[in-house]
Image (cartoon, rainbow, N blue to C red):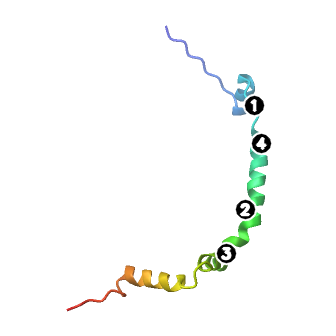
């Protein structure tokens, strides 16, 4: 014997029927908090700010990056005959 039950309801109705909590206010609060944190820190992700933060700890890091890219591209490698 097969019994097939089909229930047509929205997710909100199913959540209410099963007694699950409504998490929409919590989700909205978290999204608002994430949005405000992103807005606070958006200035730290400009290309200028990123370059300053990367190169601030070591004055020779720019030269090291240049050497690394030269070696990766093959232009910095000496070819002996």
Q: Which mark sits nearer the N-terminus, 2 or 3?
A: 2
Seen from the viewer's position, the closer of residues 15 and 50 is: 50
CB of mark 3 within 8 Å of CB of mark 4? no
**Mark 3 surroundings: few (<14), some (14-19) or many (≥20) residues within 10 A:** few
CB of mark 2 within 8 Å of CB of mark 4? no
Residue under pointer 2: 38
The spot of residue 47 in percent (x, y) is 63, 77
| Cα–Cα gap, marks 3 and 4 | 31 Å
| Cα–Cα gap, marks 2 and 4 | 18 Å
57 vs 81: above or below:
above
Please tell me which residue is depicted at 30% across the width and 89% down the height of the picture: 78
Q: Secondary structure at mark 2?
A: helix
| Cα–Cα gap, marks 2 and 3 | 13 Å
Residue under pointer 4: 26
Q: Which mark is residue 46?
A: 3
Q: Secondary structure at mark 4?
A: helix
Q: Secondary structure at mark 3?
A: loop
The spot of residue 8 in percent (x, y) is 66, 26
Q: Which mark sits nearer the N-terminus, 2 or 1?
A: 1
Residue under pointer 1: 21
Q: Secondary structure at mark 1?
A: loop
| Cα–Cα gap, marks 1 and 3 | 41 Å
């Amino acid at each position: 014997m097969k019994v097939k039950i089909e229930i047509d309801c929205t997710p909100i109705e199913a959540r209410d029927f099963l007694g699950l909590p409504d998490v929409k206010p919590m989700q909205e609060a978290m999204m608002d908090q994430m949005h405000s944190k992103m807005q606070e820190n958006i200035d730290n992700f400009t290309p200028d700010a990123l370059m300053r933060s990367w190169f601030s700890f070591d004055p020779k890091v720019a030269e090291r990056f240049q050497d690394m890219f030269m070696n990766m591209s093959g232009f910095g490698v000496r070819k002996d005959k």
